[in-house]
Image (cartoon, rainbow, N blue to C red):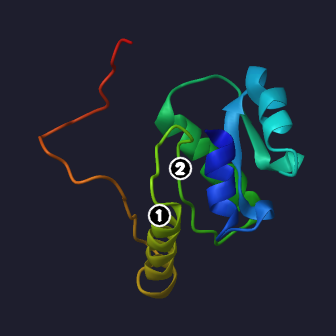
Amino acid sequence: MIQLTYERLLKIIPKERIFVVTGKRYKNLVQSNLKDLPERNIIIEPEGRNTAPCILLSCLYIKQIYEDASIAVLPSDHAIKDSDEFCNILSTANEYVEKENKEAIVTIGITPNRPETGYRIYKI
């Protein structure tokens, strides 16, 4: 799934601006699956602490390289049926942030069918 996410992003973002955050134990796996991703673009979490700290670490790291970057957080375990439409939506969101509201946070997701305050965990 990480390869699919990476390939999808390559349609609209150069590989130099795609970053992957992972744990130390998965670094080699990321490198073997994304062979052309620059090594500096693999961010290693010092300790797994869930999503918010991971996003903060990534933002701080990316800001050191690209000071005014717009950042999209895209888990690699999402299923995207229409890759081109997804890329169009990301591009539209980025255009809004870049041209209309640099302070905006844009969220993209499915239309909810019930109230939900968090992630659900399913046992398989």
Q: Nearer the viewer, residue 46 or 72?
A: 72
Q: Residue furthest bottom?
A: 99
The quarter of the picture where residue 57 lies is top right
Q: How many discs appear? A: 2
x then y, percent, for residue 25: 76, 20
Front-lying residue, 123 or 84: 84
The amino acid sitting under disc 2 is Leu
Q: Which residue is mark 1?
A: 86
Residue at which label 2 appears: 74
| Residue 40 x/y as whole percent | 85, 48
Query: What kind of element bears circle 1?
Result: helix
**Extreme-front residue of the structure:** 81
Q: In this rendering, would 95 be left or right of 12?
A: left
Marked residue nearer the N-terminal end (2 or 1): 2
Residue 3 to residue 11: above or below: above
76, 96: nearer the viewer: 76
Label 2 and label 1: CA atoms lie apart by 11 Å
Determine the residue positioned at 57% across, 41% down.
76
Which quadrant would residue 111 be assigned to in this image? bottom left
Look at discs 2 and 1 and give the one toward the viewer: 1
